Image (spheres, helix red, strand yellow):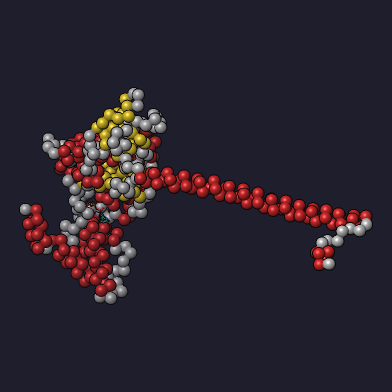
Amino acid sequence: MAESARQPQEPQNPEEMYRYLLDRVTNMETRNLELREQLRQIESDKRYIETQKIRYEREVRKLKSEIEQLRSPPLVIGTVTDVIDGGRVIVRSSAGPRFMVRSSMCIDPEKLKPGVRCTLNQQSLAVIDILPESYDAQIYGMEVIETPEENYDDIGGLDPQINEIREAVELPLKRPELFEKIGIEPPRGVLLHGPPGTGKTLLARAVAHETNAYFLRVVGSELVQKYIGEGARLVRELFDLAKKRSPTIIFIDEIDAVGASRTEATTSGDREVQRTLMQLLAGMDGFEQRGDVKIIGATNRIDILDRALLRPGRFDRIIQIPLPDSEGRLAILKVHSKKMSLDENVDLQEISFLTEGKNGSDLKAICMEAGMFAIRSEHDAITRQDFLDAIEKIGLDFDSQKFRNNFGAMFA
Ligand code: ATP
């Protein structure tokens, strides 16, 4: 009895048979649809997993190559000095000596030229790769300014010098056609010389501002490098960068550090300075005269400069920036006190008489100190007494007997 209850009832007649079969077919079709849906789902999962697999494999390969690169020994940096046929190259490693080595077949022979920087295998010194030109001014401590802020109104008492530099630098950059019409070559470079703090840098920055030129400032001592040939390469890169970004004004401050007169050099350091100077001379000769690159040099020691630098065709205009006279000092004081609130009792003419022998940067410091005195004594405006105190303070700082004695002892 229990057995028969568990068994589905057998169809008794054809009609029941028909319904039974219909039922089964419907069930099977539904099941088929379900299975198809499952299959579709599984196939899409499979595709997703396959793409994931490919992605992870790629990542593993990348990480493996990264690990390999990180583990690989460092490459030596060198410079190609000559290219001989058949993949043979003469290179100079950064440590100094020159070697004849082979170059990698992957390097484009067009790019393998004397002067380019390359990486060398540590053991065989074979050339592995060519490095891009590194015009990274920041690395070499050059100051690069798109266009400086200063203008001629910020300079006091240097009107004749401003006129000269405008003629020599601004006019050829702004109106080259004037020189073409007359048929003369404009000056290539200008040398500013005079005591420290008299406004040489300021003047160069103002010219760059007026001409919308790219301003590259480099201090002469930074061009002198430790390794042989590095200084000369720096000068070459400086000129290349200037040409690329033209119109450019290259301002070489303290040029006497590289441009000092060439004597019988005894140490290798002296010879390196001379090599740098020669590259500088070659660079200055390499410009087209009406080109958009102008060089302004500045020095406090024109007496020790090499004659070759001073000959026409290099620094054609030599402009002296003297210590300001009383009128000049008045003009400088006016510039620096322009934005200050001055009391009625302040007579700048008097201050200029009292500051005999002071340079532009001293006068700027005096104005600033006077302001500090006014703040300290909580005045609304700077008074005559504040200026007198400032003159005394600045004078004491630099001219005091104690300072002079120490200075004398230091350099005795
Ligand atoms: P160094 O030879 O030591 O490099 P420098 O002649 O290049 O000195 P600057 O750097 O131009 O001197 O001047 C220093 C500061 O003194 C400037 O920032 C400027 O504010 C002030 N100064 C100098 N001369 C003048 C001037 N004629 N007019 C206005 N400000 C001046």
Q: Give the image quadrant in which the ligand numbered 1 is located.
A: bottom left
Residue 280, position as x, y percentages in the image: 25, 37
Q: Is residue 345 visible?
A: no
Task: Check the image and report above or below for 46 versus 80.
Answer: below
Q: Where the N terminus falls, by quadrant?
A: bottom right
Q: Quadrant of residue 192?
A: top left
Q: Residue at x 28, y 36 (%)?
A: 123
* Towards the viewer: 292 or 354: 292
**Is 107 displayed left or right of 325 in the figure?**
right
Front residue of this view, candidates 20 and 306: 20
Compared across the picture, whether 158 is left or right of 60 comes to left
- Residue nearest the observer in this picture, 5 or 61: 5
Number of marks? 0
Query: In the current view of this chain or complex, which residue is farthest to the bottom?
Result: 378
Compared across the picture, whether 335 is left or right of 388 comes to right
Q: Is residue 100 above or below residue 224?
A: above
Q: Give the x, y percent position of residue 405.
A: 7, 60
Q: Residue 11 in the image: x percent, y percent?
A: 89, 58
Name the residue: 67% across, 52% down: 41
- Can residue 380 be seen by looking at this rendering? yes
Q: Quadrant of residue 190?
A: top left
The image quadrant that residue 85 belongs to is top left
Residue at 90% x, 54% y is 18
The image position of residue 346, as x and y in percent, is 25, 68
Q: Tell me what residue is drawn at x 27 percent, y 68 percent.
A: 371
